[in-house]
Image (cartoon, rainbow, N blue to C red):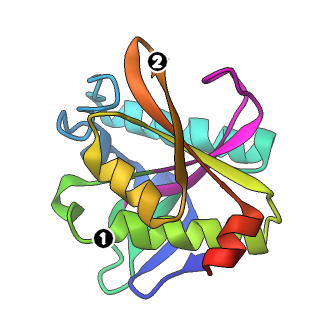
Amino acid sequence: MIETERFFIRPLIAEDAAGIFELDSNPKVHTYLGNNPIKTLAEAENVILSIQKQYEDLGIGRWAIIEKLTGNFVGWTGFKYIIEPVNNRVNYHDLGYRLIERYWGKAIATETAKACLKHAFEVLNLDEIYGICDVGNEGSKSVLQKCGLKLTESFIYDGIPHYWFEIRKEDWKHRN
């Protein structure tokens, strides 16, 4: 679907369950995500089924990041179409990413998120993309900013302060 220098980005498939389990069972991964890691492979399989349902119902959902050299599942990136109100907004595309811990600190989230933004604006022809992160998550804040999203406000999400970011197609084109 999408290719970067080091990765393939493609829809999640059933065979990604072990990778999703490694990713989402790690409490460190969930530090800024509500601290509710999964506990079983069946839960990982259900995560994939849920995202596949988003592909079917909404035409989009998070995508797997696959390392070209090894074929390893690294995590996920891409968009989720938000249909429930967040920060008084609804019906928008949220840019997100989540990596298995051993892949942290290697600029993977930035590389793959930038490729997803290019895809969003050039292929999907979207007009704007949004992102949020816990105010304590400096890594995620940095990724969103490196991708060109602008921090526009802070808000409370699930009782926790979060940042709200956005980028419009014309601003992205100007940057690129």
Residue 78 at x, y percent in the picture: 56, 56
Q: Is residue 19 left or right of residue 56?
A: left
> Could you tell me which residue is drawn at 49 percent across and 83 percent down?
4
Q: Nearer the viewer, mark 1 or mark 2?
A: 2
**Residue placed at 40% from the left, 67% from the top?**
110
Q: Is mark 1 on a helix, strand or loop?
A: loop
Q: Could you tell me which residue is drawn at 54 percent across and 52 percent down?
A: 150
- In 3D space, how far apart are the residues under numbered discs 1 and 2 (Cα atoms)? 28 Å
Position of 34 with respect to 156 (left or right) is left
Does the stretch in magenta take in 34? no
Residue that badge 2 annotates: 156
Q: Mark 1 points at which residue?
A: 107
**What is the span of residues highlighted in magenta in the rendered image?**
75-96
Identity of the amino acid at label 2? Answer: Ile
Q: Is residue 107 above or below residue 102?
A: below
Check disc 1: other Cα within 10 Å, few if <14, some if 14-19, many if 20+.
few
The residue closer to the viewer here, 160 or 83, is 160
Q: Quadrant of the C terminus?
A: bottom right
Residue depicted at x 78% and y 42%? 58
Measured as percent of width and height from the top left, residue 172 is found at 66, 69
Comparing 114 with 18, the one in front is: 114
Query: Who comes first in sequence, dot 1 or dot 2?
Result: 1
The answer to whether residue 175 is above or below residue 54 is: below
The x and y percentages for residue 46 are 49, 33
Residue 62, visible in the rendered structure: no
For residue 71, what is the image quadrant? bottom left
Tag 2, which secondary structure? strand
Asked which quadrant contains residue 160, the reply is: top left
Seen in the image, is 21 located left or right of residue 166? left
- Say the numbered circle drawn on residue 144: none
